[in-house]
Image (spheres, rainbow, N blue to C red):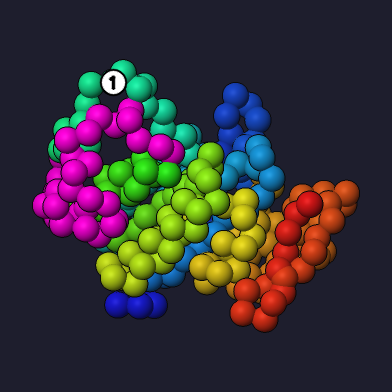
Amino acid sequence: MAGRKIIEVKNLSVTLDGRKIVGEVSFTLQSQEVLAIVGPNGAGKSILLKTLVGINKHYSGEIYFAPGTKIGYLPQRFHVDSYLPITVREFLNLKPEHKYTLEEVLRLVDIPETWLTQNLGTFSSGQLQKILLAWAVIDQPHVLLFDEPTENVDVVSQESIYDLLHELQDRLAISIIIVSHDLDVVYKYANTVLCLNERMLCYGEPVATLTNEALSELYGDHAFFHHHHFGNHHHDDVQ
């Protein structure tokens, strides 16, 4: 049901090797909401996702999940050796719980069944992202966490992946947290944006929150922002 609180984070801080990587982060994720996390390289975005998914356990503050919440996660980088002798079928079957058959999940993410017999190492970056997406949704998670899902993917594949995420959100009624450098994506798909540069600098609805002043604080005073938001021909790019 839309509007139900799925995740609530209060005063989250992460300190690694004596250095505060993330501090003072608080937000709420509702069911069927898309939250985008933006910020420069080294801002703590990836470690924030790893903390939410339980990979990093060294944090202070509170992380609340609604009872029974299941998380799907796609990391920023997933390297597959071209000589690795594992097929897509074998890879997907490594997931301990399946709510969909392999054929059903392939249809969900719009990839042909012929891929099942091919080795993972034979696929392009864009194709591999779709396979990872199949892995992430095969057990029917309530929330998907994506860390730069289109990094090192060509522009056509980027658009295809984001459109697919949007379609999955509608079809499966899931919530999404996505890390992205592409502000076009934030304006087009996100309900809420969280600006992070080691600490939370802004949080709210994208068009109202991502002002020139907020972006300048986030990326530095030297950054130049050209406004262009989706829907009203108004867009923000960091150049």
Q: Position of residue 202 (x, y in %)?
A: 68, 62
Q: Residue furthest toward the bottom?
A: 232
| Residue sitting nearer the eye, 232 or 172 | 232
Dot 1 falls on a residue whose secondary structure is loop
When asked about the image quadrant of residue 50, the answer is top left
Who's the residue at 47% across and 47% down the image?
Answer: 149
Q: Is residue 160 visible?
A: yes
User: In the rendered picture of this protein, how many numbered marks are placed on residues?
Assistant: 1
Who's the residue at 37% across and 27% down the image?
Answer: 80
Residue indicated by mark 1: 84
Q: Position of residue 62 (x, y in %)?
A: 46, 52
Q: Position of residue 16 (x, y in %)?
A: 57, 29
Give, as a single range, the part of the protein colored magenta: 96-125
When asked about the image quadrant of residue 57, the answer is top left
On screen, residue 201 versus residue 159, left or right, reads right
Question: Which quadrant is the N terminus positioned in?
Answer: bottom left
On screen, residue 78 versus residue 206, left or right, reads left
On screen, residue 215 versus residue 170, left or right, reads right
Who's the residue at 51% across and 68% down the image?
Answer: 189
Task: Let me know if residue 113 is in the magenta part.
Answer: yes
Query: Counting other residues with Cα less than 10 Å from the Cα at mark 1, is it few (<14), some (14-19), or many (20 or more)?
Result: few
Q: Is residue 55 visible?
A: no
| Residue sitting nearer the eye, 6 or 205 | 205
Is 237 situated above or below 192? above
On screen, residue 119 versus residue 81, left or right, reads left
When asked about the image quadrant of residue 26, the answer is bottom right
